[in-house]
Image: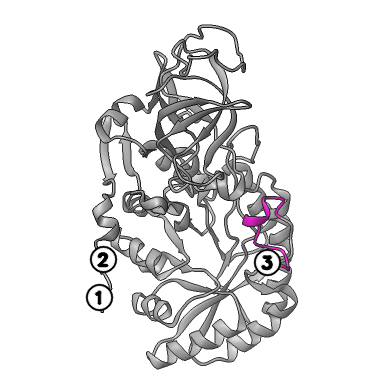
């Protein structure tokens, strides 16, 4: 469990605030974030890269809330965006466009124009077709676009295949064997300025080896480019450092940065990294309430008010999140997975049973956790841990469910940073069809 979420007198708290008080005030489902955890994570990156020119570009897709973006901008962060919408969020949060890199395989003309008008730091270009389009768009605006090529080093990130991005079969980036020719082309195009090189091999990496293997391949290409007179200003080595959800043992931020700096010690270019999950993942939890306990012939079900539309990761990746009771109870009896006797429909004694923790969405894939040992009763609160990354940002309105509220806590200060949606808001922009 994160240091920022801990039991105090058997009540699970975020910093100094009981999560039960937050649930009472703002309802459930509800995302809750630790302000201190966010700040501490960012400062660890700054400290780890101190003494070397660098820019920490937060990967906005991990969590897009304006309060989080504003806090990171105030701390000095740059931002890695993958859409025009994310760029507009960053600007709305008060961040400077000069610290923004724009990644993504499908940038539209409108998004390119938006980024050029804002004067972002760099476009991370992912194909020859994009390179040509960006040159044309920049030319039509009388501008020169700063670019780096996202080079695919064909390095196995050893992570879930859905979040692996650095293999030759992935859709991301320019093939390593083709990168030199495309750099030559970029250098010749009149409305582009070659600024750097980019590499990102995946997310939730728990070993340093793949990072270093990718960096070494990038550096070999940088040497070849320099020999041809294509001198780069920065090396963008992407993100992907993992966090602990269960028993993973990812490298610390200091160890990760130290390994990269050792590999890059002969280089003088500015270093850019793009952390996302590692900054926000363990800084947030999803609060949910038990609506019903249902006992079937083979399994017990804890039906909660959060669902796959609130937290997609378990259904999408079969991802594992720790699920903790907000009120820790003294067990009435040892663990038993036996089914209740006739007429005993709820776990009113607080016995520890094995539950499938599921939501109300009409899909068998709607679950938050399989086979969890919990001592709970109807109405109890649960906290789905490590939910700060790819939780709210991937949420949806499936089954016409309003998205959850979001709350930030610093010490004993609690602030609503996103109001809970209403059903009316979901269809306010729709029109009936009349002949």
The earlier-in-sequence mark between 2 and 3 is: 3
Res. 190 mark: none
Report the number of discs. Answer: 3
Q: Which residue carries the number 3 mark?
A: 170
> In terms of secondary structure, where does tag 2 sit?
loop
Residue beneath the point at 47% across and 16% down: 347
- Quadrant the C terminus occupies: bottom left
**Residue 426 locus on image (x, y percent):** 30, 57
The answer to whether the residues at label 1 and label 3 have Cβ atoms under 8 Å apart is no
Task: Give the magenta part as a residue range.
Answer: 157-170
Question: Front-most of 316 and 99?
Answer: 316
The answer to whether the residues at label 2 and label 3 have Cβ atoms under 8 Å apart is no
The earlier-in-sequence mark between 1 and 3 is: 3
**Residue 13 locus on image (x, y percent):** 38, 25
Q: Which residue carries the number 2 mark?
A: 429
Q: CA distance from mark 1 to mark 2?
A: 16 Å
Q: Does 280 sit left or right of 318 as displayed?
A: left
Question: Front-most of 303 and 421?
Answer: 303
Query: Which label sits in the foreground, 1 or 3?
Result: 1
Query: Which label sits in the foreground, 2 or 3?
Result: 2
Q: Residues within 10 Å of mark 2 (few under 14, many from 20)?
A: few
Res. 434 mark: 1
Q: CA distance from mark 2 to mark 3?
A: 36 Å
Residue beneath the point at 68% across and 66% down: 170
Question: Front-most of 384 and 205?
Answer: 384
Residue 177 highlighted magenta (yes or no): no
């Amino acid at each position: 469990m994160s240091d920022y979420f801990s039991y105090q007198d058997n009540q699970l708290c975020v910093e100094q605030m009981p999560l039960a008080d937050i649930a009472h005030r703002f309802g459930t489902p509800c995302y809750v974030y630790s302000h201190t955890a966010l700040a501490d994570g960012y400062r660890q990156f700054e400290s780890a890269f101190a003494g070397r020119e660098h820019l920490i570009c937060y990967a906005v897709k991990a969590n897009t809330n304006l309060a989080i973006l504003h806090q990171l901008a105030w701390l000095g962060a740059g931002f890695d965006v993958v859409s025009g919408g994310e760029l507009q969020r960053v600007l709305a949060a008060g961040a400077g466009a000069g610290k923004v890199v724009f990644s993504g395989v499908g940038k539209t003309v409108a998004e390119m124009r938006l980024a050029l008008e804002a004067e972002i730091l760099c476009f991370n270009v992912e194909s020859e077709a994009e390179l040509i389009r960006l040159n044309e768009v920049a030319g039509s605006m009388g501008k020169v676009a700063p670019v780096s090529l996202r080079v695919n080093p064909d390095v196995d990130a050893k992570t879930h295949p859905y979040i692996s991005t650095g293999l030759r079969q992935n859709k991301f980036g320019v093939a390593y064997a083709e990168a030199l020719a495309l750099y030559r082309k970029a250098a010749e195009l009149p409305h582009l300025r070659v600024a750097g090189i980019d590499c990102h091999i995946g997310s939730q990496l728990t070993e340093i080896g793949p990072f270093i293997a990718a960096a070494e391949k990038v550096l070999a290409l940088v040497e070849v480019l320099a020999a041809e007179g294509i001198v780069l200003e920065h090396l963008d080595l992407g993100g992907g450092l993992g966090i602990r959800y269960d028993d993973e043992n990812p490298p610390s931020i200091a160890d990760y940065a130290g390994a990269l700096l050792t590999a890059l010690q002969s280089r003088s270019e500015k270093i850019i990294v793009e952390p996302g999950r590692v900054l926000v993942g363990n800084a947030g939890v999803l609060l949910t309430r038990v609506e019903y306990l249902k006992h079937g012939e083979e399994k017990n079900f804890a039906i909660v008010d959060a669902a796959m539309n609130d937290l997609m990761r378990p259904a999408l990746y079969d991802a594992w999140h720790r699920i903790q009771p907000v009120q820790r109870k003294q067990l009435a009896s040892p663990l038993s997975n036996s089914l209740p006797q006739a007429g005993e429909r709820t776990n009113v004694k607080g016995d520890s049973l094995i539950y499938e923790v599921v939501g109300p969405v009409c899909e068998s894939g709607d679950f938050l956790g399989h086979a969890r040992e919990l001592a709970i009763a109807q109405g109890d609160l649960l906290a789905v841990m490590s939910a700060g990354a790819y939780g709210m940002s991937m949420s949806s309105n499936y089954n016409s469910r309003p998205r959850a509220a979001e709350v930030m806590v610093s010490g004993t200060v609690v602030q609503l940073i996103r109001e809970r949606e209403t059903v009316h808001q979901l269809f306010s922009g729709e029109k009936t069809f009349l002949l």
